[in-house]
Amino acid sequence: MYGKSPAFDTVATNADDTAVILYTSGTTGSPKGAELSHANMIFNARLSDTMYARQDNDVQLVTLPLFHSFGQTVQMNAGFYNRNALTLLPRFDPDAALSIMERDNVTIFAGVPTMYWAMLNHPNPEKFDLAKIARNLRLAVSGGSAMPVEVMRAFGEKFKVEILEGYGLSETSPVATFNRLDRPAKPGSVGLPVWGVSVRVVDLEDKDVAQGEMGEIVIKGHNIMKGYYKKPEVTAEAMRNGWFNSGDIGKFDEDGFLYITDRVKDMIIRGGFNVYPREIEEVMVTHPAVSLAAVVGVPDPVLGEAIKAYIVPLNGSNLTEQDVIRHCRIHLEDHMVPTQIEFCIELPKTDSGKIHKAGLRREAQRFPD
């Protein structure tokens, strides 16, 4: 404050003292405050040593909100730790992001999948020196929600960079798994557990499922929060037998790579079948006229839940409901084919840029077909 002394008293803190309270994004319900300690934050920032090589003169574009764990830890804290230059964009906009990447010779970009999708589908890419952007960009990191494989492939081809996908939550500081540069990445996978962190996939009785089978992801290690702020009952529900229950469904492959199927709360139960929206969304975006898709469950008096898809078509396409359903019938089992299709110009997003599934569900229930 103007006229005040820059000196202030310091306070000694312990490693397990609360450093920050980061609120979950609320994509599936009400946000909760995750209490993270100083040790949580420092260990997570230093994980970059084991994930990718440090390089002199790296420039990071930081456009993720700094109140979110992805922006605060993976970019700001890790950027300071690695002595990166940080160029800031207060709110993501694909035009501004590409302009800054060209102007500031950005070498590292981290974002949620919708950011990659927006840059990939910029309506006037000729405005930018894409060759220069691609030449400088050495590392691209995705997290926050599942990256559609088709978006990852197309962005990699256009910008000549491999997107490394990781996985974590506000409650895990956030990084829990990551695809690394020292071994081939697997598209669709969020990689391997990071240093000092254990990850399991369990059934409803907290027993490990077989390799390749789906279950809930549980996590243990230095990255786990102290608890939810002033919510001891919710904390106890999330922390069972010393493991944090993520609420995410996933599976391990034969090499120990983790794949995220969906959120437990996003799973649709249709006529007794468990349906995972991400599997449907991955198929939909392979249609040449589909730009982006989001799938939610809506109440159905006969089947319990019906499947509704919100679709952003590519500009200029004449996509119809029947086109989408026909494409799904070719690639999906019958019980996974959506019965309701709604076309839209854009999908609602949280402040951190993730698709707001809870908002879509509320809208679908307010205005049923």
Image (tube, rainbow, N blue to C red):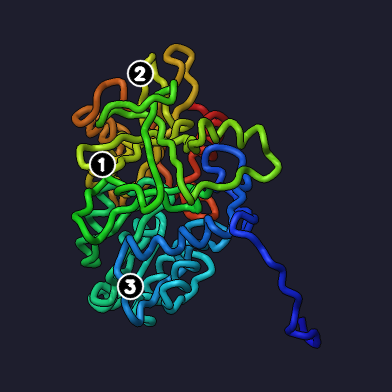
**Is residue 287 in sight in this rendering?**
yes
Amino acid residing under circle 3: Arg
Which residue is found at the position 27% from the left and 27% from the top?
A: 210
Q: Earlier in the sequence, mark 2 or mark 3?
A: 3
Q: Could you tell me residue 227's position as x and y percent?
A: 61, 43
**Is residue 96 in sight in this rendering?**
no
Residue sticking out furthest to the top: 302
Please name whichever residue, 205 or 74, is drawn nearer the observer in this view of the structure: 205
**On the rendered structure, is 262 left or right of 139?**
right
| Depicted 29 relative to depicted 347: above or below | above
Q: Secondary structure at mark 2?
A: strand
Residue sticking out furthest to the right: 3
Amino acid residing under circle 2: Phe
Please name whichever residue, 28 or 173, is drawn nearer the observer in this view of the structure: 173
| Depicted 311 relative to depicted 207: above or below | below
Q: CA distance from mark 1 to mark 2?
A: 27 Å
Q: Which mark is residue 256?
A: 1
Q: Secondary structure at mark 1?
A: loop
Please name whichever residue, 12 or 189, is drawn nearer the observer in this view of the structure: 12
Q: Secondary structure at mark 3?
A: loop
From the viewer's perspective, is the residue at label 1 or at label 2 nearer? 1
Q: Earlier in the sequence, mark 3 or mark 1?
A: 3
Residue that mark 3 sits on: 54
**On the rendered structure, is 87 left or right of 231?**
left
